[in-house]
Image: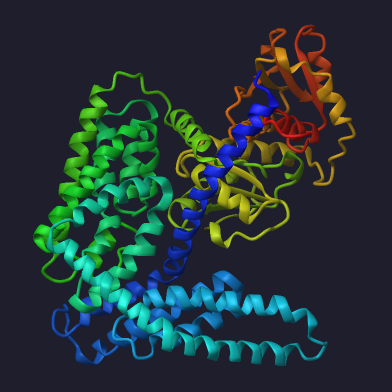
Amino acid sequence: MMSQESLATGQNTVKSKKSVKTRVQQFGTALSGMIMPNISAIIAWGLITALFMVPGGWFPNAHIAELINPMLHYLLPLLIGYVGGRMVYDERGAVLGAIATTGVIVGAKVPMFLGAMIMGPLGGWCIKKFDQLFLDKIRAGFEMIYKNFSAGIIGIILAIIGQSIINPLVVSGSNLAAKGVSWIISVHLLPLANIFIEPAKVLFLNNAVGNGILVPLGIQQAGQLGKSMLFLLESNPGPGLGILLAFCLYGKGSSKSSAPGAVIIHFLGGVHEIYFPYILMKPILIIPAILAGVSGTFTFQLLGAGLKAAASPGSIIAILLMTPKGSYIANLAGVLVATAVSFVLSAIILKRDKSLGGDLEEKQAQVEQMKAESKGITNNNADFSKSGKINKIIFACDAGMGSSAMGASLLRDKLKKEGITDIPVTNTAIRDLKPEPNLLVVTQKELADRAIAQTPDAMHISVGNFMSSSRYDEIAAMLKQETKENKPSGADKNTADTTNVLDKIDFDRVQKIYFVSGQNNIGSTTMAASLFNDELAKTHQKFVAARKALDEVVDSADELFITTKPVAEQLGSQISKAQVIVVDDLLKSKELKQLVLYLNGEDV
């Protein structure tokens, strides 16, 4: 068995690696977080431009077209600044973000999206720090005058700074970025961007890349030229569609049977996350995705494609709605070329694959576990002792739409079939998660650490694919069992001496760990084993726990059984060599929490 010292060393190394990736993800999410809530406003501007612009619109109308410039130069930047301030300090920060953004807007001849993404969070941060210093010192009865005048004065200062300092810097930067993009397009290098975009999408940076970088640059370009190709780089459904079509014909097992439904969700629904697990299952498929993206972008550039505004979600329907007159053939050609390239290359790879295939969820879980270990995805706070009775379930993803909404819908249907209708199941963006009592958060494994940071006291479950996960059956079984037993949330009365329990176990001879279930606790035992494995996955130690029914137990000296008292009484007559840890509650046991810490090399 690995020493605790080596385990601790490995864990520290993993954590250091994780912090860098997490910061990159958080920065990208912060950028996209200011854009995503305002996508509907951007689409409204795009539709007005596509329909009523003079000239070039489907129904040119000079009067209605007067809305275009005010929305582009004032409404959209102010909304972005407002949301950016709210992300930092709720409504008070939002107001400061909007005031500060006004400073960079005034006098600017380019759309101030970048300025808004700077001044919005800056305004929220300034008023937050000011309140931290002085709010508690204000005497009773003077809170209102303090809040109103402090926000007003700080807002004026930030607006002046924005107008005199940030505005010229952002204008210069925007002009430089525009020239850079124009140069890249002129020398036909834009397709190379997909070498980075496609892997970034699969690593759940798609919203950060698309909405955080490409959309602001695209809006600026569309404001000048009437359309922008940048809107198509990340939203092109072709690379994912070709891969899913290849699985429809040449996949194996559940990956083949689930692919047709995924095609509809991806191509028509615009939820690109649906095809990420298929690439994670066979990582070599990232090559067809990259080449397809490069081919599609090259076609877009060759034919002069572009959109009036962002296509969000990345559905072919959204793309067609945002397509200006005269660009339909170019846009569709780029999508079709990307689809054909990814389909042909993926089909060759899948046809040459001699493996037996197997279950998509099983293989996906294996890939995700390796990715989690290598990237430092930890689940420290999936604390068994904090789970309690679940009162609310939230699905959290990067954007708070698309895949998480579908996952929540699937779980609601499962719970309804089990007769569980009193537990609300909703979805949201990770950035909007708030601590709540008795909360269960379900998120993708790549995003688990960020969800835990937002709600450290909640019960966390990570899945590989929101649209197809066996964990939903485990959740339903656990909640059904909990309902059947009608156990109060405060029923945890573990009184065992944890240290003594662990001291009695000879870990040097333990090779396998099993959670033993009776007929009445199959659901909770399965869930406990899954959560236990999530905890153990953060280090490079050897254990993977499994569930075993009582009648399947075989007495062996290298096995450690974990079970409840009623099952332990029956188990005692079957074993003499194996070791046993007995707990009162598999999901809320202090013994299991301490065991996880011990196996992960931490002090108990």
Would you say 307 lies left or right of 107 here?
A: left
**Residue 443 in sight:** no
Task: Specify the quadrant of the image occupied by residue 503.
Answer: top right
Q: Nearer the viewer, residue 168 or 454?
A: 168
Can you give x and y, in whole percent of width and height, for residue 516 in the image? 71, 21
Give the colour scheme shown. Answer: rainbow
In the image, what residue occupies the spot 34% across and 54% down?
269
What x and y, as percent, mark residue 384?
A: 73, 39
Q: Is residue 93 left or right of residue 517?
A: left
| Quadrant placement of the C terminus | top right
Residue 292 sits above or below residue 226 on the image: above
Q: Position of residue 568 (x, y in %)?
A: 81, 19
Q: Position of residue 366 (x, y in %)?
A: 48, 29
Image quadrant occupied by the N terminus = top right
Q: Residue at x 25, y 46 (%)?
A: 239
> Based on the displayed image, in which of its 4 quarters is residue 312 positioned?
bottom left
- Marks counted in the figure total 0
Left or right placement of residue 378 versus residue 270 in this view: right
Q: In the rendered image of this protein, does residue 216 appear above or below residue 528? A: below
Point 75% across, 45% down: residue: 386
Residue under the point 47% across and 54% down: 25
Q: Is residue 604 above or below residue 27?
A: above
Q: Is residue 554 left or right of residue 495?
A: left
Question: Can residue 468 be seen from the camera position used here?
Answer: yes
